Image (spheres, rainbow, N blue to C red):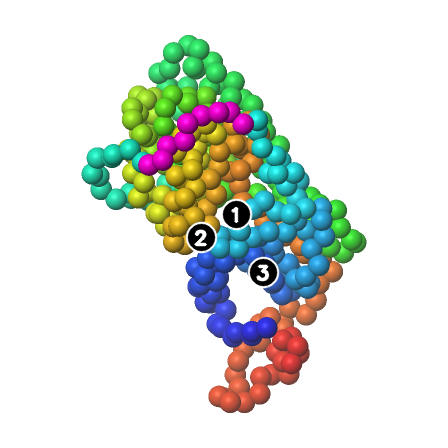
Amino acid sequence: VHLVRFAAAELDQVVAQINSTGFGLTAGIHSRLAERADKLARQLQVGNVYINRNMVGAVVGVQPFGGRGLSGTGPKAGGPLYLSRLQKPAATPHSMQSCWPAVAEQPPLTVVNRPLQSWQTVTLAERERQLRSVLAMLKLPGEDRAELERLADTLFSQARTWLARPLGLPGPTGERNELHFEPRGWLLYLVAGRQHRHLYQALLSALISGNGLIIACLGHTPEWLKAMQQTALPLQIVSFNPAFLAHPALSGVISSPDCGYNALVQQALVTRPGALLPLICEPGGQRLLQRMWLEKTLTVNTTAIGGNASLMLIEDSAPSGAMPPQGLASALGA
């Protein structure tokens, strides 16, 4: 166990340094200040957060366990979404491409985080309102519009069920256990062929969940997509280049299950530097929607919040080399 002292004003920078390691399995927070503990729990990019208790002994159904980044892509063992991730849709025979097609020379992929950060700060209800407003202005054939609106109604209803509030989990008296669902970040969707229904579902699922979407087209780009790019949504449309799969801003790749390039995408994701990224190729529906989220388990010892908050405000006034104040030594277990 390492004890590191830092100025209280530098806490945000310390958390940023922890997140920048790329590893995110478990974090422990000890604080009598509930507001500070909750802020740290939101900021830390890890799979499990324990507040004012030990960091071992995760229980199935109580503290679903699993990390993110270099500590894993999910799902969380013992969580409500675990079983569905062990299932596979019926195999559909299709040809797999052995190499990428020739692509025209183009500039590197540029990802601007500002629209995504703004999108993630608005409420789920506001994201739904903005998406419905954009869908209403699209020029689509009657059948396509009706299908898109039906998909939106279904997916938005499912999103409200799962994302409106944390999922409460059982646990002993004096402990609060919650499962939080957070957006992954920037996702790249590979369009190779006429897979409009899957594209509709992936686009709506990614955006309603708070993600940004980069749609990379191998071939023709539909006009309605170009129109959506002109809105304030965190959405980019580009011509596909395999080099984009190594972009450090990506948090995952989406494609349809019958895309012939999935094996090549998997190979590229395995060999890319940085965090482990998932290839999300669920056929659609709620299972596709649920892959748009990262899971974070929050376990709080509710009996430890409050008490002698002055221990958290002790200033280091001792001269260099002197023993720390008795209160601080006690707080650190010295």
Residue visible at 64% across and 83% down? Answer: 326
The secondary structure type at the circle numbered 2 is loop
Q: Quadrant of residue 174?
A: bottom right
Pick the quarter of the image with the C terminus: bottom right
Q: Residues within 10 Å of mark 3 (few under 14, many from 20)?
A: some
Q: Quadrant of residue 33?
A: bottom right
Q: Tell which circle, 3 or 1, labels the residue nearer the N-terminal end.
A: 3
Q: Which residue is more in the foreground, 205 or 164?
A: 205
Contact, mark 2 vs mark 3 (Cβ under 8 Å): no
The amino acid beneath tag 3 is Ala
Question: Does residue 332 belong to the magenta stretch?
Answer: no
User: Which disc, if any, is residue 65?
Assistant: none
Q: Which numbered disc flags the more N-terminal residue, 2 or 1? A: 1
**Quadrant holding the N terminus:** bottom right
How far, Cα to Cα, is label 2 from label 3?
18 Å
Question: What residue span does the magenta drawing correspond to?
Answer: 91-99
Name the residue beneath numbered marker 1: 73
Q: Is residue 95 magenta?
A: yes
- Mark 1 neighbour density, 10 Å: few (under 14) some (14–19) many (20 or more): many
Q: Residue at x 62, y 65 (%)?
A: 30
Q: Position of residue 297 (x, y in %)?
A: 62, 50
Q: Amino acid at mark 2?
A: Ala
Q: Which residue is mark 3?
A: 27
Element assignment for label 3: strand
Residue at mark 2: 275
In this view, the residue in front, 6 or 292, is: 292
Mark 2 or 3: in front is 2
Q: Position of residue 63 (x, y in %)?
A: 68, 51
Q: Nearer the viewer, residue 57 or 36?
A: 57
The residue most toward the left is 105
